[in-house]
Image (cartoon, grey):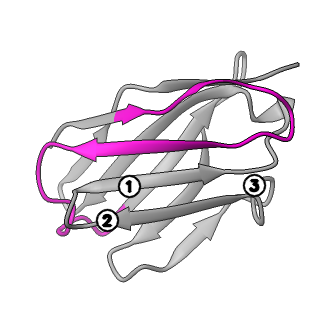
Amino acid sequence: VQLQASGGGLVQPGGSLRLSCAASGSIFSFNTMSWYRQAPGKQRELVATITSSGSTVYAGSVKDRFAISRDNAKDTVYLQMNSLKPEDTAVYYCNAKRIGVNAWGEGTLVTVSS
């Protein structure tokens, strides 16, 4: 499967963005779909995960501000980001996992700055 992330851009602090991750095939079979991010000079970190049953997990730094969702009919995963902060600036990557598969998409840059 190939993953294509989109929706990044420049936004002011307090603003919102919605990232999309479109898969070339069905996402129904993946156990988890996740968003990761990597800020300059830092390691890649998990932002949010959604399981095939719809359960979600968030990093503490984004909980109550970000929301991950999936649309199996469109083979797309979303990350709604609200109340953005400068420290959310990073390249955001989507990831899909199932037994024997760990797929990554190219990142999309999110810059939060006034």
The magenta segment: 5-32
- Would you call the spot at circle 2 few (<14 residues within 10 Å), some (14-19), or many (20 or more)? few
Position of 47 with respect to 64 (left or right) is left
Q: Which mark is residue 62?
A: 3
Disc 1 designates what residue? 77
- Indicate whether residue 66 is drawn in magenta: no
Examine the rendering and report whether any part of residue 44 can be seen: no
State which tag comes first along the sequence, 3 or 2. Answer: 3
Position of 5 with respect to 74 (left or right) is right
* Number of marks in picture: 3
- Looking at the image, which residue is at 76% across and 58% down? 65
- Looking at the image, which residue is at 28% across and 44% down? 22
Which image quarter is the C terminus in? top right
Amino acid identity at mark 2: Asp
SS for dot 2: strand
- Looking at the image, which residue is at 37% across and 26% down? 106
- 112 and 63: which one is in front? 112
- Indicate whether residue 16 is drawn in magenta: yes
SS for dot 3: loop
Which image quarter is the N terminus in? top left
Q: Which mark is residue 71?
A: 2
Query: What's the CA distance linking mark 2 and mark 1?
Result: 6 Å
Examine the rendering and report whether any part of residue 11 can be seen: yes
